[in-house]
Image (tube, rainbow, N blue to C red):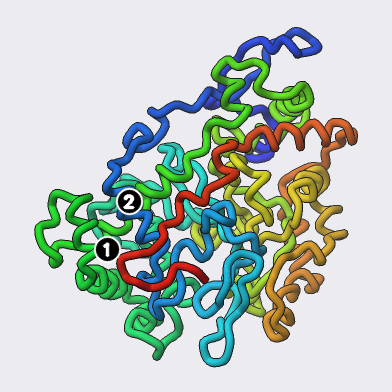
Amino acid sequence: MKRLAVILGLALIGTTAFADDDDDDGNGHYWPTAVSDRDYYDNGEPPAAKVELGRHLFFDKVLSGNFNISCASCHHSLTDTGDGLSLPVGEGGAGLGVTRDTGTGSDAVHERVPRNAPPVFNLGAREFEVMFHDGRLAVDPTQPQGFLSPAGADLPAGLDNVLAAQAMFPVTSGTEMAGQPGENPVADAAAAGDLPTIWALLADRLRELPGYVDLFQAAYPDINDPADITYVHAANAIAAFEASAWRADNSPLDRFLRGERGAMSQSARKGMRLFYGRAGCGGCHAGSFQTDHNFYAIAVPQIGPGKGDGVSGHDDFGRERVTGLRSDRYRFRVPTLRNVALTGPWGHDGAFGSLEAMVRHHLDPVVSFEAYDRSQVTLPFREDLDAIDFLMHDDELARAEIAEACELRPKRLRERDIRALMDFLHALTDPASLDLRHDVPKSVPSGIPIFD
C-alpha cells in the first residue's frame, strides 16, 4: 500500500509552491523547483578539453571490438540521443536510426538489444544516481569504488560520477559493442566475463593513436605519456561530453519556473496543474526532472529477445534481476520526461510508437496492455528475429503475470484533459535540443569513418 500511495500521491520533494494566476480555484500548486547550474556536476561546466576528448570518443568506433559501432550509433545527436528504434541494433548492424539494418552474412547481429536505448538528456545532473532501465548501476557509498555495478570489485577507481561509471559498460556487451567470441580479443574477453581485460585492450588502442594521446594529455594533467591512459580516463571524458552537450533545461517549463509567466501556453499550464494534481502523474514523475528515480510495474508489453528470464529465456524480469526480489518483477525505472516528445519510441522496450499512446496507456494499463497494437513497434525486418519479438506477448501465462504485477489503478480523464497533458509534455522540450548537428565531429582520431 505504501508503494501505491507514492504512485497515486502528489510528490512534494524537490518542489516549490506558489500561486498560479491562471488557477481556477486560486490555490497554490506545487511545481518543481527551477533547475540551475548547481544541480549539475562541475556546476554545469565540465572542463572544455575533457568535453572535446569525450566528444571524439563518443563518435569513434575504435571503442568497439570489431571497429564497427560507436556509442553514437545508438545515442546519436541526429536521433535525439536515442536511435528512434524500439530496440537497438547493436554490433554488426549498419545505418543510423530507423534506417539501421541488422547486418549481412557472418557479420549480422545475433539478436536485437533487449531494451530500448534510453536518451541521454540531463544525465549530468547530480540527482541521477541510478542508471539503466533496471538500475543495475547506482551510487552506493558502501561499495569499494562508490557504485553498485555489474562489475562488482572489478570496477576500477577514479570514476568521476555514476554517468562515467555507466560509460564503462556498453563496450563490455557482445550484443552492443564487443562482438561475438572468436571475432576479436575484446569479444573473447566479454564472453569470458573478463571486464578488466576489455578495458585494458581498449586503452591500448587509444595509446597507439597520436591524435588521442594529444587529446588525453590536454584533458588530464596526470597523463604524461601514452602509458598513463586508462579506460577510466575515457569514461570520465565521455561523461563530461554527455553532461555538457545534452543538458536540456531551457524549456518553456524552465522559463516559467524562473518567472517568465508567459513561457507556457494556457493549455500547457492547465496540463501542468493536471500533471501535478488530479491526474497523479507527479507521484512518480516528481521533482525538477520529472522522475522519482524509482521502479514500478505498469504493464508495458514485453517485446524482443528478453534478458534470459522465464522458462523460455525470452522474458525480462526488470528490477528483479538486480534485487532478486519476486516483488520487483516487471518493475522498471521511471524515466525523466525532459525532451520526452523527442525521445520515442517509449517504454523500457520501446513498445509505444507515439507519446500519446504511452500517456493513454497510463490511464488504464491493463486494458491498454490487452488491446496492444503491435504495429506501432519500430524494428528492422529480419524473419528469424521477428519470430521472437512477440513470444512473450503471445504467451497467455506471461501476459497474465505482467497484468497482475501492474501497480497503476485506472484513471479517468476527459479528452480535453489529455490534450492539455500533451501540451504540458511538449512544454518540457528545450528548443536547443531540436538541432544537435553541431555535436557531431567531422572526423575522429582513429580515422574510422563516423558515418554509418
Residue sitting at x 69%, y 70%: 379
Residue 406 drawn at (x, y percent):
73, 51
Residue sitting at x 78%, y 73%: 395
Quarter of the figure with residue 18? top right
- Report which residue position mark 2 lands on: 52
Task: Compare residues 355 and 275 and report the one nearer the observer.
Answer: 355
The crowd level at tag 1 (other Cα within 10 Å; few <14, some 14-19, many 20+) is many
Query: Does residue 118 sit above or below 396 in this rendering?
Result: above
How many badges with numbers are in the image? 2
Query: How far apart are the two marked residues, 1 and 2, measured between alpha carbons?
Result: 16 Å
Residue 21 drawn at (x, y percent):
72, 9
- Report which residue position mark 1 lands on: 231
Residue sitting at x 41%, y 87%: 181
Nearer-N-terminus badge (1/2) = 2
- At numbered mark 1, what does the secondary structure look like: helix, strand or loop? helix
Residue sitting at x 15%, y 65%: 226
Task: Compare residues 312 and 29 and report the one nearer the observer.
Answer: 29
Q: Quick check: 278 left or right of 231? A: right
Residue 175 in sight in this render: yes
Q: Are marks 1 and 2 in contact (CB under 8 Å)?
A: no
Residue 105 drawn at (x, y percent):
57, 91
For marks 1 and 2, give the one nearer the viewer: 2
Residue 431 drawn at (x, y percent):
59, 37
The disc labelled 2 sits on which kind of residue? Glu
Query: Does residue 142 sit above or below 440 in this rendering?
Result: above
Q: Which mark is residue 130?
A: none
Q: Quick check: 261 left or right of 247? A: right
Query: Does residue 228 sit above or below 159 in this rendering?
Result: below
Query: Does residue 22 sit above or below 446 in this rendering?
Result: above
